[in-house]
C-alpha cells in the first residue's frame, strides 16, 4: 500500500501537532512520567481528548490508571471468562479489518435482548466484557502496525439498527449503555475511528438526542448515518473480503452463513432460566404496594405531541390488572383497557406514542382481590420528540440527503 493510499483510507488520521500542541505534549509527558508505564495506551490520546488542556488531561490519565488497577485490566485478556448467557446472547463481534488496518466491529443493536441480559447478569459483567474488547483492540493495533508497517489505531464500527423499535426506549438499558460509553471514553479516549450507522430507524433521532451529551464535536465528524442504502458507504472503508456478505461483501462463515455468526453474536431472546433474582436491574425499579380491593394510578405529564411513554412492571407472588388512561373532561379515558396480567410470572412492558398532550395514567388494578395486597416493581418514562435543531444536526450525519427523506425511504421500524 502506498503512502497516498494510506492517507486516502485513513480519513481520520491523527492531525499533525502545532508547535503549541507539541510543547503541551512534552510538558504532559513530563508531568505523568511516574504513571505512564502503568497504562497500555497512548497517553497522547488523553491530551487530545481534553483539547490539550494539560491539567485536565493529567487528571483524566491518573484517574484512569487508578481505575485500571482496581479493575485488573492488565490481566483481562488472560483471565476473563465471559458469562454463559452473554456468550450465547450478547450481540456483536469483530470480523477482520478496514482498508486502513483498523479492526472492524459489528454491533447488531436491534437484535439484543438487553432486558433479558440485564436480568441475567450484573453491571460489572457488562463492564468487564467491554474492557476486554478494548484491550483486545489495543493488542490488535500493535499486531496490525507490525504487519502493515505503519501505525494503526482506531476502530471501525458498523452499528446495524435493523429491528430497532420503541422497546429501545427503556431507561434502565439506556442508562447502562451510556454508563459503558462514559467508561470507555474516560479510559480509552479516541478509540473510535468511524461509526457507520445503518438501517437507521424512525426513533434514531430520539436515541441520538439521549446520547448527545457524550458525543464530542470530534466524534460527530466520525458518524455516518444510512437507512437501507448502505453498501457504498461500507465499501468506501472496508474491502469486500472483510465485509459480511449480508452487508454486500464476500465474508461468510465456513458453512456459508452470510451473517458470520461464528464471529458476530446474533443475539435473540434470553431464556428465562438465565434470569437472576438479585441483579443490578432490579435495584433500578421503583416499588409500590397496591392495597387489596383497590387501584393505583400513576400520573405522567406529556407536554409534547408525539412523545413516547415507555413502561415495565412486575409483581411478586400474584397477578394484577393493568391499563393506560388519558385524563379528559375530568374522567379517565381508556387507551389500553384494564386487563389482568400474569405479571408475577412474566415481566410486562410496553410503549405508547402519545397523540395528545396532557395527563396520562398507568393504572394497576387489584380491585378483584379482597384479601391480598400486591407488591409492585415498575419503571416508566416519557421520551419527548426531537427538536428541530437536533434534526438539523442529524442531517449533517446523514450527509447525502436529510433525515426526513432517509426515514421515509428506508424506514425499518414503526412507532
Image (cartoon, rainbow, N blue to C red):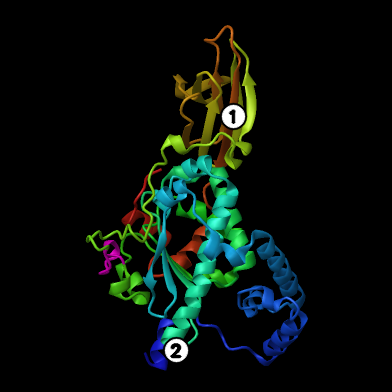
Residue 51 seen: no
Residue 402, how many percent across, how many down?
41, 63
Q: Residue at x 65, y 74 (%)?
A: 46
Instruction: Examine the rendered structure and indicate whether residue 285 appears above or below residue 205.
Output: above
Q: Which residue is mark 1?
A: 377
View extreme (top): residue: 370
Q: Is residue 1 left or right of residue 347?
A: left
Residue 212: x and y in percent read: 57, 59
Query: Counting other residues with Cα less than 10 Å from the Cα at mark 2, is it few (<14), some (14-19), or many (20 or more)?
Result: few
Position of 142 relative to 306 (above/below): below
- The kind of secondary structure element at disc 1 is strand
Dot 2 lies on which element? Answer: loop
Quadrant for the C terminus in the image: top left
Q: Residue at x 53, y 58 (%)?
A: 80
Residue under label 2, please give it. Answer: 149
Residue bounds of the magenta highlight: 244-252
Residue occupying the point 41% across, 38% down: 271
| Residue 245 among those drawn in magenta | yes
Residue 252 located left or right of residue 89:
left
Q: Residue at x 59, y 48 (%)?
A: 123
> Residue 240's quadrant in the figure?
bottom left
Q: Which is nearer the N-term, disc 2 or disc 1?
A: 2
Q: Nearer the viewer, residue 12 or 27?
A: 27
Q: CA distance from mark 2 to mark 1?
A: 57 Å
Crowdedness of circle 1 by 10 Å Cα count: few (<14), some, many (20+)? Answer: many
Residue 236: x percent and y percent? 35, 76
Amino acid at each position: 500500500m502506498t503512502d497516498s493510499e494510506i492517507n486516502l483510507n485513513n480519513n481520520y488520521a491523527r492531525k499533525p501537532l502545532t508547535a503549541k500542541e507539541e510543547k503541551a505534549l512534552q510538558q504532559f509527558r513530563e508531568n505523568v512520567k511516574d504513571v505512564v508505564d502503568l497504562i497500555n495506551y497512548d497517553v497522547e490520546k488523553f491530551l487530545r481528548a481534553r483539547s490539550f488542556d494539560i491539567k485536565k488531561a493529567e487528571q483524566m490519565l491518573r484517574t484512569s490508571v487508578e481505575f485500571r488497577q482496581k479493575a485488573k485490566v492488565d490481566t483481562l485478556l488472560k483471565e476473563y471468562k465471559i458469562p454463559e448467557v452473554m456468550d450465547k446472547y450478547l450481540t456483536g463481534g469483530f470480523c477482520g479489518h478496514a482498508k486502513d488496518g483498523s479492526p472492524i466491529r459489528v454491533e447488531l443493536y436491534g437484535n439484543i435482548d438487553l432486558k433479558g441480559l440485564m436480568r441475567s447478569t450484573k453491571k460489572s459483567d457488562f463492564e468487564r466484557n467491554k474492557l476486554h474488547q478494548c484491550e483486545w483492540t489495543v493488542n490488535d493495533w500493535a499486531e496490525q502496525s507490525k504487519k502493515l508497517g505503519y501505525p494503526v489505531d482506531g476502530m471501525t464500527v458498523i452499528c446495524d439498527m435493523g429491528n430497532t423499535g420503541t422497546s429501545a426506549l427503556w431507561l434502565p438499558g439506556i442508562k447502562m449503555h451510556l454508563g459503558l460509553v462514559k467508561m470507555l471514553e474516560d479510559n480509552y479516549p479516541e478509540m473510535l475511528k468511524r461509526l457507520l450507522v445503518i438501517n437507521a430507524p424512525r426513533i434514531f433521532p430520539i436515541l441520538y438526542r439521549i446520547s448527545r451529551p457524550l458525543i464530542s464535536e470530534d466524534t460527530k465528524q466520525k458518524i455516518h448515518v444510512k437507512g437501507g442504502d448502505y453498501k457504498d458507504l461500507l465499501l468506501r472503508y472496508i474491502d469486500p473480503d472483510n465485509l459480511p456478505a449480508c452487508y454486500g461483501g464476500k465474508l461468510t462463515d465456513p458453512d456459508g452463513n452470510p451473517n458470520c455468526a461464528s464471529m458476530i453474536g446474533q443475539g435473540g431472546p434470553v431464556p428465562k432460566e438465565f434470569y437472576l433474582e438479585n441483579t443490578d436491574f432490579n435495584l433500578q425499579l421503583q416499588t409500590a404496594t397496591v392495597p387489596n380491593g383497590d387501584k393505583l394510578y400513576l400520573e405522567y405529564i406529556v407536554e409534547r405531541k408525539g412523545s413516547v411513554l415507555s413502561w415495565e412492571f412486575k409483581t411478586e407472588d400474584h397477578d394484577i390488572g393493568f391499563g393506560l388512561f388519558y385524563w379528559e373532561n375530568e374522567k379517565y379515558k381508556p387507551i389500553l383497557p384494564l386487563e389482568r396480567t400474569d405479571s408475577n410470572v412474566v415481566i410486562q412492558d410496553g410503549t405508547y406514542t402519545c397523540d395528545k398532550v396532557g395527563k396520562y395514567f398507568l393504572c394497576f388494578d387489584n380491585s378483584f382481590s379482597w384479601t391480598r395486597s400486591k407488591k409492585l416493581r415498575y419503571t416508566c418514562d416519557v421520551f419527548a420528540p426531537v427538536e428541530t435543531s437536533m434534526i438539523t444536526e442529524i442531517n449533517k450525519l446523514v450527509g447525502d440527503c436529510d433525515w426526513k427523506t432517509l426515514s421515509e425511504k428506508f424506514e425499518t421500524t414503526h412507532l
